[in-house]
Image: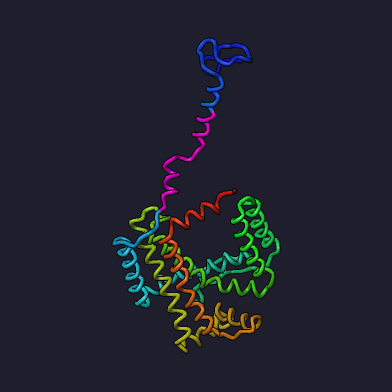
Amino acid sequence: MNCPKCGFEQSDHAVECVRCGIVFAKWQESEELALLAKHRPPADAVAAEEAVANGRIGRKELQILGGGLAAAAIVYAFPLTRFLFSALVTLFHELGHAVVGWLLGYPSLPAFDFVYGGGFTHQGTFHLPIALAVAAAFGYGGWLFRENRVSVALIAVLLVGWLFFVTAEWRRELAIAAAGHAFELILAGIFFYQALSGVGWRVPEVERPLGAFAAFFVQIHSMMFAWRLIHDPDFLAWYREGKGGALMNDLEVVALDVNIYGRLNPGIEGVARWLLVFSIVPMGIALLWYFQRARWHRMLRALRTAR
């Protein structure tokens, strides 16, 4: 064998080099440690991940949220600016239809509707291979985290929920119809959390106030939509006409499915009340997450580990 340091040839059973004197076992150990250190995450990155502190609302957070709320209220108060920025709500809404459509086996493409206004998600027929691909993704996730019982249990709960909706046409229709308004509020909650925490932005000084504005505008728009359905008969009558006088709107689809298959009769007004109640949930969760960030981040790290 040759010495790994000086290259001098010597016996295969030598313990140390006769020329430079290094001990081969110690040399090998130091090389292994150096290799391990090379592939180990930087200490500052690990420390940054571990050092997630609970959130607090100070002067800066109040300025960001207050400015965003004021801007959203002003923009919503004027019909022209409300109409222009409602495109953001439409984007969130149709994205919800498309995402849930794909998850439940329907090829879906969100788009703006330049004929009747708002948006429209082009949706194909149910494709079993798409549903099987989603089921396979659940199976792969379960296998990947097979030694982490909590993660496997969470994946199993999500799988059961998905199976509940995907195994009946009316439940698929119900979930896709409800997803539009639900995604508006969920994405508003995510933007609200990002505005509070500063997480996920490239230029936080500029993007945090914009995120707060987007969150509050979508929130106000969605809540006022539900409120008008409950209290404005003319608006309710217009909504009942559907898109183009032919296609039922989302809350009417939900009300009809719940009536036929759930033996309940909430009507559009009742579903609008559900929507109004749900509207406070995403931002409430975002606040809870922000104030308890340290705990939730520890839980997420535990769920991400394969063991």
Closest to the observer, 172 or 55:
55
Residue 296 shows up from this direction:
yes
Closest to the observer, 262 or 289:
289
Residue 247 shows up from this direction:
no
Name of the residue lying farthest toward the bottom: 233
User: Which contiguous range is marked in magenta?
Assistant: 32-52
Please tell me whether residue 43 belongs to the stretch shown in magenta.
yes
Closest to the observer, 178 or 82:
178
The location of residue 52, given as percent across then percent down, is 42, 52
Structure colour scheme: rainbow
Q: So how many labels did they put on this image?
A: 0
Closest to the observer, 300 or 194:
300
The location of residue 237, given as percent across then percent down, is 51, 88
Residue name at image x 37 percent, y 73 percent: 81
The location of residue 262, given as percent across then percent down, is 64, 81
Magenta segment, prevailing SS (helix, strand or loop): helix
Please tell me whether residue 49 belongs to the stretch shown in magenta.
yes
Q: Name the image quarter holding the N terminus.
A: top right
| Residue 137 figure quarter | bottom right
Residue name at image x 64 percent, y 61 percent: 156
Residue name at image x 56 percent, y 77 percent: 250
258 is higher (above) or lower (below) than 105: below
| Residue 222 figure quarter | bottom left
